[in-house]
Amino acid sequence: MSQYTMFYIRHGNDFIELDAFSRNSVVAQIVHEYAPWEKLAAVGSEELNGWINDVKEMIESERASIKRYEDDIQMISTWDNPVEEKMDEINWRRDEIESMRQDIEEDESALWFFRTLLGIEGNMISNARYEDHDPNWDRYYIYIGCETRCHPTIQDLVTPENATEEN
């Protein structure tokens, strides 16, 4: 059975699911230490920016590895080894490059998701603060949880004292 990490937006006492990711996804792997089990935790811009930076570093590392493999392929072609040996080495590196390119695509999707959440979070706070003149603007957040129930409530928050019900 696969476990899922869920993302929600909160407006007042309502939690609206944005998306869910299986534990094998890049998104779930990055946030797994932060997402509470069967509970919800608020996610702010600090966490989102941290995750964005983590994904950017992953992409940069994978691109650097691809460059090294491409350089290796150029070098291998100059070896005095038999052609079969050179082709085996070249093909292995090409397979690795293709795998890393697929990883980069997945990482870029995660990067897009985190950036989208950051935009949503910023817009919700801005709208609540300025357009709606909502005195509880600080109650508008992105929330995350692992294996949360279908319709989370205020009682599912990790810090319920920071998220009291509206009267």
Image (spheres, helix red, strand yellow):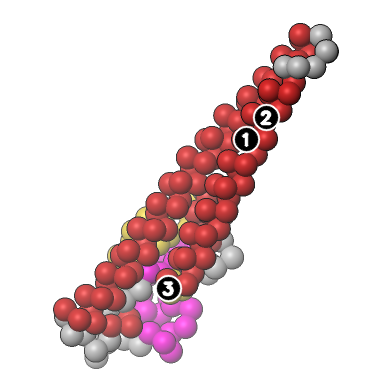
Q: How far from the left and from the top, in percent, is residue 127?
A: 21, 75
Horizontal arrangement in the rendering, residue 60 relative to residue 132 (left or right): right
In the rendered image, residue 144 lying in the magenta stretch gets the answer yes
Q: Which residue is mark 2?
A: 71
Most extreme residue toward the right is 81
Q: Position of residue 102 (x, y in %)?
A: 52, 35
Report the front residue among 149 and 68. 68
The magenta stretch spans which residues? 142-163
For mark 3, give the secondary structure.
loop
Q: Nearer the viewer, residue 153 or 53?
A: 53
Q: Are marks 2 and 1 in contact (CB under 8 Å)?
A: yes
> How far is disc 2 from disc 1 in space, using C-alphas?
6 Å
**Residue type for callout 3:** Gly
Q: Residues within 10 Å of mark 1 (few under 14, many from 20)?
A: few
Secondary structure, mark 2, is helix
Residue at label 3? 44
Q: Are marks 2 and 3 in contact (CB under 8 Å)?
A: no
Q: Closer to the camera, 134 or 160? A: 134
Residue 95: x and y, percent? Answer: 63, 26
Identify the residue under disc 1: 67
Q: Which mark is residue 80?
A: none
